[in-house]
Amino acid sequence: MAKIGIKVKVNGVERAAEVESRLLLVHFLRENLRLTGTHIGCDTSHCGACTVVLDGRAIKSCAIFAVQADGREILTVEGLEQDGKLHALQEGFFQEHGLQCGYCTPGMLMTGYAFLKSKFNSTEGPTESEIRHAISGNLCRCTGYVNIVKAYQYAAAKMREGGAQ
Amino acid sequence: MIPRSFEYLAPRTLSEAISLLQKSGPEAKILSGGQSLIPMMKLRLATPAYIIDINRIPGLNYISESDGYLRIGALARESDLEVSPTVISRFPILADTTAVIADPLVRNQATVCGNLAHGDPANDHPATMLALEASLIAAGPSGEREISVESFFTGLFTTDLQPDEILKEIKIPIPSPLSGGAYLKLERKVGDYATAGVAVQITVNDAGICQRAGIGLTNVGFSTLKAKKAEAFLTGKTLDDSTIKQAAELAAGEAQPIDDIRGSADYKRDLIRVLTARAINRAFKRAKGGA
């Protein structure tokens, strides 16, 4: 089957590749671009370890073909840190012990990134129940949800102080 | 898991998509959100030779109100429903439904039309659309036709859509004042299919007498069921506890559940009874202006 040319902006950098139509986005990121921060967990679109932000929305990269991302913009966990400075969410996970084994963390961070961005009109919150609803598609098998919620709250407070980013 | 190879086609217009469907016939699948299709392709439960990606067709991503109808375009995502002011204020039943479909990440990609076109009786929107008496606009080679949602679901993973047709729009009548609806689903965990689900949409008059009732049942049959006996029983009656109780028993009798990993048939039938009563109560409260 002929390969298809795609151009995708990943973490601010234009990337071009020839891919098979059946190549999943997660494999494109990990194998073609060697961006292995995005994890494959269940490979059945249940666990959310493969979450990336596509045109501002958090999605599961194991349930979308790379060709569908042609002409679009992707943010992966590698793109969160800016100029050597951790994103407020990454700092929150560090400060609040939001990870144990770390496998779900990239997905948790990307879901959180899109969620906190969408929530940034409000002057307070998000509440614990809003956060728990937002992360209901990301499984943490260490069951460290309490600290993940705290990490989100840490980041939200920090982002409010410093203005939305 | 790697899907079988396929030819990827990305038409820019609806008519181009339809002519591609005509050419490739039943070997083609339409890709909108892909949140059921792609997992099925990975498991090789689906092995289409052609994928026709409609995501690059402009003008299909809308949730709008016109001529007394709410219209949901083929590319409107589940998460768009969650934030639509019209949906939140006039269609609480739709807001209930979308909030319990899969999980937030899947809802960012999954489409409402796809939830229907997939024809899975375990999906949640079919019951809601039955309760709302929606119609579906199918676009095909000879133009558009309107299908009542009641005649759309013909069986397990089977709909009235022809191989050369695309589900273009869901058209839902805007409910009259004093209307309310609710969708209740029991799931073992987020992302699971319903053990059972019930959608109820009612309209009452000033005296609190039920003018119309729509009731859809999720995942208790080989296609999504409309609880017609319970609907007919409610119509013309005051919605007191004993009426609601009897309607719930009728709905339970109309369910056709089977024993499976989510529970026994008896358990699910009883669940339909409980959820129907609760959904009628909530719909009634909302019809009277409550939350």
Image (cartoon, helix red, strand yellow):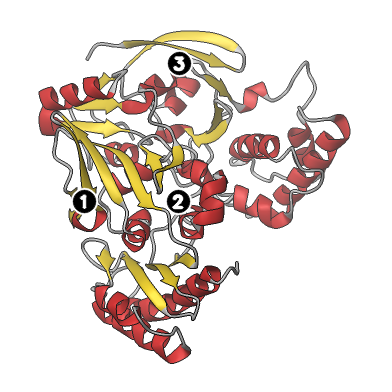
Q: Amino acid at mark 3?
A: Asn
Asked whether B111 or B242 is in front, the reply is: B242
Identify which residue is drawn at 37% across, 22% down. Answer: B56
The image shows residue B233 at horizontal and vertical percentages of 30, 82
Q: Which residue is mark 1?
A: B157
* Residue A32 tag number: 3
Answer yes or no: is residue B131 visible.
Answer: yes
B152 sits to left or right of A14: left
Label 1 marks which chain's residue? B
Going from N to C along the chain, the mark reached first, 1 or 2, is: 2
Tag 1, which secondary structure?
A: loop
Give the residue at the far bottom of this rendering: B242
Give the residue at the far front of this rendering: B206
Q: Are marks 1 and 3 on the same chain?
A: no
The image shows residue A135 at horizontal and vertical percentages of 60, 48
Asked whether B212 or A138 is in front, the reply is: B212
Label 2 marks which chain's residue? B
The image shows residue B255 at horizontal and vertical percentages of 26, 74
Mark in the foreground, 3 or 2: 2
C-alpha gap between disc 3 and disc 2: 29 Å
Instruction: From this view, report whether residue A83 is shown above or below residue B3.
Output: above
Instruction: From this view, report whether residue A127 is shown above or below residue B57.
Output: below
Label 3 marks which chain's residue? A
Q: Which residue is mark 2?
A: B102
Q: Amino acid at mark 2?
A: Ala
How packed mark 1 is, by other alpha carbons closer than 10 Å (few <14, some 14-19, many 20 or more), is: some
